[in-house]
Amino acid sequence: MLCACAGYVAAAGRKAPATPDLAGRWDKEYDIVKSEIAGRRRLASLAPQTYRQDSLILQADRDPTDVILRRMEALAGHIQTLPGAQDLKALKAG
């Protein structure tokens, strides 16, 4: 993955930054989810085609934080089902 990203950046004629702009990426992802919430009715039409319902914007999702936390919980739950997965229950806030 890293090699593919480095190749893409090199192909674009730019050098990859020494450290990724994580805060910028998080802001961008937050804005994307916020936009998805605003267009949830349009996205609801895609539900029958969606493999994992956790990826959808649900009616109960109030803001991007709800969506991100719900998706992270679903991901952790899925990881728990994989062979040899570590127990992640200790990481869950009680």
Image (cartoon, rainbow, N blue to C red):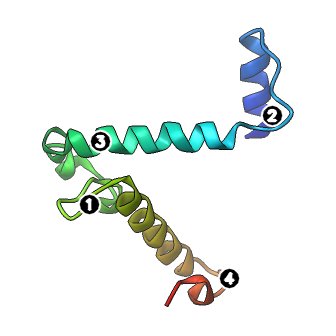
Residue for badge 3: 36
Residue 27 spot, x, y in % from top left? 52, 40
Say what amino acid the circle numbered 2 marks: Cys
CA distance for labels 3 and 2: 31 Å
Figure quadrant of the N terminus? top right
Residue type of the residue flagged with mark 3 = Glu
Mark 3 → mark 1, Cα distance in angstroms: 11 Å
Across and down, in percent, residue 34 comes to 34, 43
- Real-space CA distance between mark 1 and mark 4, rounded to the nearest whole angstrom: 32 Å
Q: Which mark is residue 84?
A: 4
The circle drawn on residue 61 is 1
**Residue appearing at x 63%, y 43% in the figure:** 23
Q: Nearer the viewer, mark 4 or mark 2?
A: 2
Q: Is residue 91 left or right of residue 39?
A: right
Question: Image point 71% across, 11% down: which residue?
Answer: 12
Left or right: residue 57 versus residue 76 is left
In the rendered view, would you say 28 is above or below 57?
A: above
Position of 61 relative to 35 (above/below): below
> Which is nearer the eye, 42 or 25?
25
Residue found at x 17% / y 51% = 48
Per the image, the residue denoted by label 2 is 3
- Mark 3 / mark 4, whichever is N-terminal: 3
Choose top left, top right, bottom left or bottom right for residue 67.
Answer: bottom left
In the image, taking residue 55 as reference, residue 19 lies left or right, namely right
Instruction: Give SS at disc 1.
Output: loop
Q: The residue tagged with tag 3: helix, strand or loop? A: helix
Q: Position of residue 55 (x, y in %)?
A: 35, 55
Query: Which of label 1 and label 4 is nearer to you?
Result: 1
